[in-house]
Image (cartoon, rainbow, N blue to C red):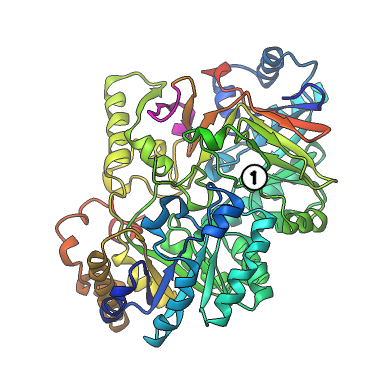
Amino acid sequence: MNVLVPLNNLEHLTQYVEAGAREFYIGFYCDAWTEQFGAYADLNRLSGYEKEANTYSFEEILAMVPKVKETGSSIYITFNSSVYSEEQVQYMRRYFEQLKQVGVDGVIVSCIELVTLAKECGVDSVASTICGIYNSDIARFYYEAGARRLILPRDLSIEEVCSIMQAVPEVEYEVFMMRNGCTFSDANCLGLHRLKNCAICASLRKGLHELYMKNKQKGHQEEVKENDRLFTKDFHKYSCGLCSIYDFVKAGVKAGKIVGRTDDWEDICRDIRLVCENVQIAKNCETKEAYLEAMVRGEYENGICEDGMSCYYPEVRFGN
Amino acid sequence: MENEITMEHCVNLCELIKQVLASGMTIGEYVEQVRKEKGWDRVGRIYIGSYFCSHYFLHLTEWDFTQIFTYAKQADCKITLVLPVFTQKNLGSAKKFLDRLSCRFDDGIDEITVNDYGMLVYISSKYCVRVNLGRLFMKDYRDPRYPEYFNQVFSPAGFTKSLYSFIKKYRIHMVELDPTHRELDVSNKPEKVGIAIHTPFCYMTTGQICEYASIAKPLEKKFRPNMECEAECLTHHIEYELEELDPARRVIRLGRTVYFENGDCVVRGADTLREIVFSLDIIR
């Protein structure tokens, strides 16, 4: 299982590779696109965070691709806004064709329209988590449309991931591994993600809200309030999937994703090292129990591992 | 909605039927109350099932369906069955559930609304029934926190060449939209497909994790995706007051989904329109 990381700072490419990253993904900004389609037409999921999330222009990305390839790594470019119009899809042809020329490994796309376009342009496509591939029927649909790799949603269990992989074994699979959990589905979270107000989950967390319940008993009210506090304040403040690595390595998952395009590069490098080290440990272990005994959790050991609130796949440690 | 459009009036009982029946109302009483509230002559169609939650769907009982189908027959009302996105662990049981349902109530199901491509292919190949693309297919951003974006006349982006080809290939009858903006212009819709608009709530975000399903769970078992539940969503909901929004704009979490209210959304560009009303307050 390769480690896939965001590459928003080319100056740290060497450190990422030395830490063990073998695959990179990156988005870009394009003034011509914005001029054509307006400020609310996102090129990718994080376009609304402007240059904080998309540091480079398309021309800079074209120049970066060969540099990344020189390190023996793969690079994928994100086109994963929730929706594109037909005009926007056709506009993207120029991006895909130029990316093919510079040897990009693939485009990460959010809809069937772009899977089709990528196929027409001879570029490999990766179906993003925005595609919402929650079951094997949807996986087969995207595979048959031409996707080479499927990114499975972060709100699937390990058992479900493995079951989908068995049912549709013809494609590569990628799963979420570290950082930035989400309480909603990437595929259907349709509030704007932008600098001014961030995602809708941020507004929900900080906004006033009133809980309504039919059972007015005091004990129940307190239980509901505490549940809500945990959900809004503690759940997925950080997210980690290290305990799942044994299952994913044995299942043949191609890549584990570290998210966090705006995060500090040193934190990303720490996570890369942790995932890589655990992948090696998993390969050498004969059982999951042996892996869980031998795995390394770094500085997370005494912090986020206690209650499952920060687990991408809590079933490993805490059962189904 | 614009007056000159010919409207088909529908009641959305998805995510609601169990609450209605638990409230002591009959389906007929509830539908009649919606009709009166809206000032309609009649209700032509009822939507049942779920858009957002596979557990809600799979927990619907034969008795629930019997109530609906019996009423629909008496009232000469058509039925649309709505299927949510099933995750892998529920896909097999969902298909068996559908088989049973179709054997038992085949003549009562007028059409099926699907919300993912996998189910679109499955239903189209297995059942001889009209198929609609549900509200989860159309993924235009919707966000009243950004007035400049929200207060525009918006043309849904999803009417792409691919969608046109799916409409033809899978004989899609209707495409469902949410009231995402102040005004929607659907004149770019494919010619032979109908448009249905949900009202008054626009879904903004949803997911596999249900806050309410975790209420009684121990800490380490809370907030698991698509977890088994005791249907806590029937008896709990949250109303928000977001600082970025006018307090008059209602934001609510029902089950796994957060909606904002936008009953004033105007739709233009279609000669006929299906209006799917989700009338929550009748039973609150």
Vertical placement of B36 versus B116: above or below? above
| Disc 1 residue crowd, few under 14, some 14–19, many 20+, Cα 10 Å | many
Q: Chain of mark 1?
A: B
On the image, which quarter does residue B79 sit in?
A: top right
Q: Does any portion of residue A72 appear in the rendered image?
A: yes
Q: Which residue is mark 1?
A: B83
Residue drawn at the location 36% of the way across and 56% of the way down = A52
Vertical placement of B172 versus B253: above or below? below
Q: Position of residue A128 (x, y in %)?
A: 52, 63
Q: Secondary structure at mark 1?
A: loop
Quick check: A74 left or right of B93? left
- Specify whether residue A71 is painted magenta: no
Residue drawn at the location 66% of the way across and 75% of the way down = A121
Type of residue at label 1? Leu
Residue drawn at the location 75% of the way across and 58% of the way down = B161
On the image, which quarter does residue A65 sit in?
A: bottom left
What residue range appears in magenta? B231-246
Count how many numbered circles sit on residues in the image: 1
